[in-house]
Image: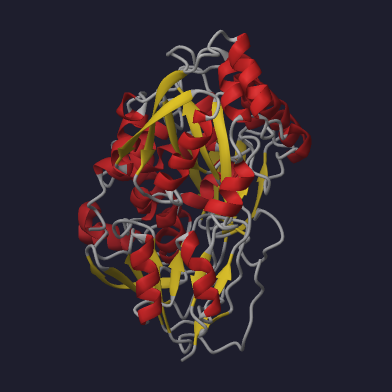
Amino acid sequence: MSLTPQRALLALALGACLATAACGSGAQPTGGAPASGSGGTLVIGMTASEIPGTDTVLSFTQGFEGDRFVNFQLYDGLTRYNLKQSDRTPEVIPGLATSWETSEDGLTWTFHLRKGVTFTDGTPFDADAVVFAFDRLLKKDSPFYYPAAAGAAGLWSGQIKAYEKVDGETVKITTPQPTGHLLSDLTFLTFPSPTAVKKHGNQDFALHPVGTGPFVFESLTPGQQLVLLPNKNYWGGAPKLGKLVLRPIPDAAARTAALRSGEVNWIEYPSPDDVESLKSSGYSLLSDNYDHLWYCTFDQAKKPWNDVRVRQAANYAIDRKSIAENLLKGTADPAYQHAPSSTEVYDPANDTYSYDLAKAKALLSEAGVSGGFSATLAVPTGGSGNLVPIPIATALQDQLARIGITVKIQKVEWSALLADLNAGKPAAGADIQCASTVTYQAESLIRAFWAKDSPVYDGHWYSAKVDELSKEAERTLDPAKRIELFRKAERIVSAEAPYLFVVGDRNPRVIAPGVKGLIQPKSWFVDLTTVSVSN
């Protein structure tokens, strides 16, 4: 079946996530290897403010933390990330497809499906299930087309022009042009049981979710917890845990208190000030650098941010090392460019902005603003992956004041910032907007910010050369050539400084002494099948 080509846009994905937020109201393994289902109960304190959506792509209602703990636990895609290693950014490996090949022109991909896999309700996983799931996202005249899921999937499905069943164990996907990030996009396009969707309908499927993933839905208490059980027949190896409980605890202090009281035995992103005391109390801190950037975007529609020298000056004024080491207590690394240091695109030679107040002041003088000026800076109060945003913003405020830039901080809710981003405008109308993002592990995001006429907020910055290079990289299948094209684009990004580069966090999490077997990957995502809990 053929479809009108769709453009993967961040605006579509974020807009759908906001609209449907109520739908789902480098360590190596240690310890023994308990049998499936006998490995205790793992209770995770997430940074999320609500339980992520439980319907496949709608887990993104709570950002990538939703994919980490819900989408990739209940479901599988044709591909997945290799999360059972911790020494490199995870590559894409076979998931529900065991192999694939591309046509000579790079437009047609043939996927060979894994045999013998069933959904946890007993429904066979086959080519019909793949077509059903794609119809749900892409075929508007399908009786099970689901606009909310289609919108949330838009970032990942935008390069799928057509798809078809070849036979029971083979499907073909056609793209409008060669697409180098299709395999990573497909990790997010996970599959629901067609039987369960037909039985419960699109809206209620989230209350009865069924996938092929390592865990099975047991219960949901909106705002409090999601309980999952191990899929003992999981094709990828059954989880060792007996039960997985996910709890939204957006406040860092509350997460620490829950860990100390035994209410949870794993917390995401601890408050940096709590790390040493937790370690001295016997808890383990696991961290690793990964594809994640905490940065700010300048609004170049406003003077003097339209002057590259002013943007460069702000970057030279930031003492990233101090923020990473003193404020964030080593839970983050300094970020001297847009490409995170864990990615293959990262080039040390492009680490442009050292801490240099003299150079910063000289650039402001050249730009004619040596007397200083005032600016507003919007920062979220929390949200997935945003670390401790207010203290970071306060540090930026203090450091920019040293070169005469007086910053007023505007605190905004994460959902409000995303809504403004979706509408193509800066949060609260601020001159500078700060938040976190992933880059090359979700490559579709790159084009959403760099492509011409993108409706998402990009600071009113556009570089035709960066657009051209990133588009060429997107349409190139050779990994080495893609990396070099993106590196060329990143050099221009550093020179033009549309962003204030701040830090990349190290994905810290703290676990109780009884939690064993966790592999800490260089990724947003994590494999929970290796984890067990003992008393």
Residue 224: % across, % down: 25, 67
Depicted 310 relative to depicted 480: above or below? above
Q: Residue at x 67, y 65 (%)?
A: 85
Residue 33, above or below 350:
below
Q: Does residue 120 appear in the picture of this structure?
A: no
Count numbered badges in the picture. 0
Q: Quadrant of the N terminus?
A: top left
Would you say 388 lies left or right of 480 here?
left
- In the depicted view, which residue is nearer to us: 430 or 140? 430
* Residue 503 x, y percent position in the rendering: 57, 44
Q: Nearer the viewer, residue 194 or 75?
A: 75
Q: Is residue 164 left or right of residue 331?
A: left
Point 56% across, 26% down: residue: 314
Seen at 52% across and 83% down, the residue is: 513
Judge whether 64 appears above or below 34 on screen. Answer: above
Q: How is the image coloured?
A: secondary structure
Q: Quadrant of residue 519?
A: bottom right
Relative depth, front residue between 309 and 189: 309
Where is residue 133 shown, x and y percent of the image? 39, 50
Location of residue 284 by image quarter: bottom right
Image location of residue 478, percent across then percent down: 74, 37
Q: Is residue 446 visible?
A: yes
